[in-house]
Image (cartoon, grey):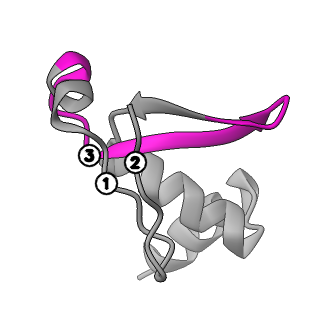
Amino acid sequence: MLAKLTAKNQLTLPKSITREIGNAEYFEVRVEDGQIILTPVKIQRADGVRAKLAALDLSEQDIADAVAWARQP
């Protein structure tokens, strides 16, 4: 089965594949031995928050300090 990569780096998965994997909207993507491996994942809201915190390089202590500061009268 073939899939074509567009000029905008978009890839359309064949319908038979999407039927087999179910209703996946997001995929983990990795390269293994020259092959592209797509693994369906379910994104939780908390995952997005964790990703944002990781990008900002905030620690749990930074967050605790911010919450304590915000709760001051």
Residue displayed at 62% across by 58% down = 64
Determine whether, in the image, residue 70 is placed left or right of residue 32: left
**Residue 31 is one of the magenta-drawn residues:** yes
Q: Which mark is residue 25?
A: 3
The part of the chain drawn in magenta is 20-36
Residue displayed at 26% across by 46% down = 25
Q: Nearer the viewer, mark 3 or mark 2?
A: 2
**Residue 7 is one of the magenta-drawn residues:** no
Residue displayed at 46% across by 81% down = 8
For the residues labelled 3 and 2, the Cα–Cα distance comes to 17 Å
Q: Nearer the viewer, mark 1 or mark 3?
A: 1
For the residues labelled 1 and 2, the Cα–Cα distance comes to 6 Å
Q: Is residue 20 above or below residue 61?
A: above
Identify the secondary structure beneath mark 3.
loop
Q: Residue furthest top?
A: 20
Determine whether, in the image, residue 22 is placed left or right of residue 43: left
Q: Position of residue 24 (x, y in %)?
A: 25, 36
52 or 31: which is nearer to us? 31
Q: Residues within 10 Å of mark 3 (few under 14, many from 20)?
A: few
Query: Which image quarter is the C terminus in?
Result: bottom left
Q: Position of residue 16 (x, y in %)?
A: 18, 26
Q: Position of residue 23 (x, y in %)?
A: 15, 32
CB atoms at circles 1 and 2 under 8 Å apart? yes
Residue displayed at 45% across by 47% down = 47
For the residues labelled 1 and 3, the Cα–Cα distance comes to 12 Å
Q: Which mark is residue 12?
A: 1
Q: Nearer the viewer, mark 1 or mark 2?
A: 2
23 or 12: which is nearer to us? 12
Upstream in sequence: badge 3 or badge 2: 2
Which residue in the structure is indicated by mark 2? 3
Query: Mark 2: which amino acid?
Result: Ala
